[in-house]
Image: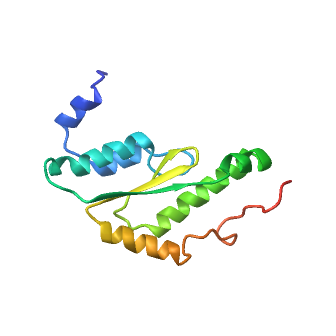
Amino acid sequence: MTHVPSAERRRSQPPDDEALLASGMDALTGLLNRETLLEVLHRRTEGHLGTPLPFALLTLGLDQFDALNAAHGPAIGDALLRAVADRLRSETRAADVAARLGADSFVVPYLNRLADLVYTLARWQEGSFRPSRADHDLPTEPH
């Protein structure tokens, strides 16, 4: 089998977000990984070169994540990361992409849809993004 560099593959094949998304998921959370997010953003913006495009990134970082991992162990940390990913999926629209950028950081890009970002932020401020023990079985005290 011949290896074809990714840049060459991009030029020879039409963009297929669905196949790209399926291949570039973070194994723990099921969200896009950093590399795939960058590729999706590139594909979605390449037709806008030279044209202003409203763009925003909603970023989410988990405060005290390292302390939680140290106190409760990586299984609890992983469960929290999966819970955050589940909540991001449930709180964003189907056309949105959410990605895990690092150990405890996530991002949702908004391309040409700043009104959607304002709507999402307003819902989160009202409390819809607050974690719920009913959603996920996370212990509240160290073992």
- Image spot of residue 138 (x, y percent): 73, 61
**Residue drawn 15% across the image and 47% down it:** 49
Can you name the residue that lies furthest to the right here? 143
The residue depicted at 29 percent of the width and 21 percent of the height is 2
Identify the coloring.
rainbow
Any part of residue 135 in sight: yes
Q: Residue at x 68, y 72 (%)?
A: 134
Give 117 or 82, whichever is nearer the viewer: 117
Which residue extends farthest bottom?
Answer: 126
Does residue 30 appear in this view? Answer: no
Q: Is residue 74 above or below residue 118?
A: above
Q: Which quarter of the figure has residue 52? A: bottom left
Q: Residue 47, percent across and down?
A: 15, 50
Question: Residue 17 vs residue 46: left or right?
Answer: right
In the picture, measured across the screen, residue 85 lies left or right of residue 53, that is right
Total count of labels: 0
Nearest to the observer: residue 10 or residue 38: 38
Q: Quadrant of the N terminus?
A: top left
Which residue: 77% across, 61% down? 139
As drawn, the residue found furthest toward the top would be 2
Left or right, 25 with respect to 74, comes to left
Q: Residue furthest left?
A: 50
Q: In front here: 68 or 13?
A: 68
Where is residue 61 shown, x and y percent of the image?
55, 53
Residue in front for this viewpoint, 126 or 13: 126
Answer left or right for 143 relative to 76: right
Q: Position of residue 73 (x, y in %)?
A: 76, 46
